[in-house]
Amino acid sequence: MIHISPKAEEIFFLGNFPVTNTLLTVGIIFVLFAAAIFLFRRRFSLIPDHFQNVVEFIIESVLDMMEPVFGSRQRAEKYLPWVATFFVFILFSNWLGLLPGVGSVIVRHGEETAPLLRSPASDLNFTIALAVISVIMINYFGVKALGVKMHLKKFFNFTSPINFFIGILELVSEIAKIISFSFRLFGNIFAGEVLLTIIVFLVPYLVPLPFLTFEIFVGFMQAFVFSMLTMVFIAMHTNEEAH
């Protein structure tokens, strides 16, 4: 029987707080990230080994890509941790959802059954939360870079009727970013999850492999698009000339 639900299923409760399968998966990702950071940090040294050389090469390549957007190397380095964290977190959230056992290990909760683990981005709550955090931090960086008055002037400009109308449009666009960010990521990942579920159910051997490869690519591209859009919006909000 095929189990497809756009709503994350509750697995257990912590007191009165329901823990869903997507929330449980996010918790596992956080634990893995913390362990990886602890291990990698101990490996870094002034004399780099092969692994550290690869990491430094990737970071330098990303900075080379970000520098033209921000206009300087210093600004690119300043916002790299935020953009990179978004990319790595979303990427591994998407890829973890493709591992064996995620979505296929079924548990019983009350009278209903549900997958124990599920791709986080297939839950709209997860993608909306990421989008809200992204938009809040984009505007926070704008305020920090330009000041409260200068940044708010972008949205509330009473110098003329035209500027006032443009400010309202800018305010609406901030809300539109949340909708765009969240539904783009959710739609692509949830659609891929449904596609793989149906393909595996109908033809469980060999045939799903090309679709699995495609979903690996989609997971990468969605993480890339989300982080790159965040980067561009940060650059726009922190650039005084743009205001």
Image (cartoon, rainbow, N blue to C red):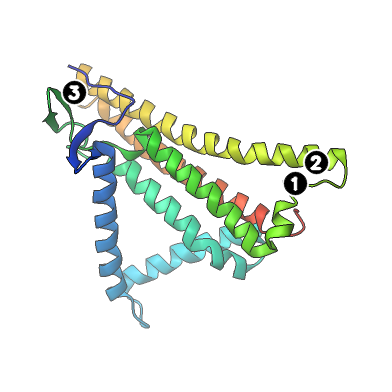
Between marks 3 and 2 in the image, the one whose residue lies nearer the viewer: 2
* Mark 3 or mark 1, earlier in chain: 1
Mark 1: amino acid:
Phe
Q: In the image, residue 167 lies at what x, y percent?
A: 75, 42
Q: In the image, residue 87 lies at what x, y percent?
A: 44, 51
Asked whether, in this view, residue 104 is left or right of residue 121, the answer is left
* Mark 2 or mark 1, earlier in chain: 1
Give whichever of 155, 3 is nearer the camera.
155
Asked whether, in this view, residue 109 is left or right of residue 221, the answer is left
User: Label 3, on which residue?
Assistant: 204
State the residue lying farthest toward the bottom: 46
Residue at image coords 34%, 41%: 94
User: Label 2, on which residue?
Assistant: 164
How many neighbours does mark 1 have within 10 angstroms: few (below 14), some (14-19), or many (20 or more)? some
Spatial CA distance of label 3 from label 2 is 58 Å
Check contact, mark 2 vs mark 1: CB within 8 A. yes
Q: Which quadrant of the rendered structure holds the N terminus? A: top left
State the residue lying farthest toward the right: 160
Image quarter of residue 172? top right
Secondary structure of the residue carrying tag 3 is: loop
Give whichever of 78, 129 is nearer the camera.
129
Spatial CA distance of label 2 from label 1 is 6 Å
Secondary structure of the residue carrying tag 1 is: loop
Q: Is residue 217 shown to the viewer in this render?
A: no
How many neighbours does mark 3 have within 10 angstroms: few (below 14), some (14-19), or many (20 or more)? few
Q: In the image, residue 165 lies at what x, y percent?
A: 79, 37
Residue 179, relative to residue 200: is it above or below? below
Residue at image coords 41%, 36%: 218
User: Label 1, on which residue?
Assistant: 156
Mark 3: amino acid:
Pro
Residue 21, relative to residue 148: is it above or below? above
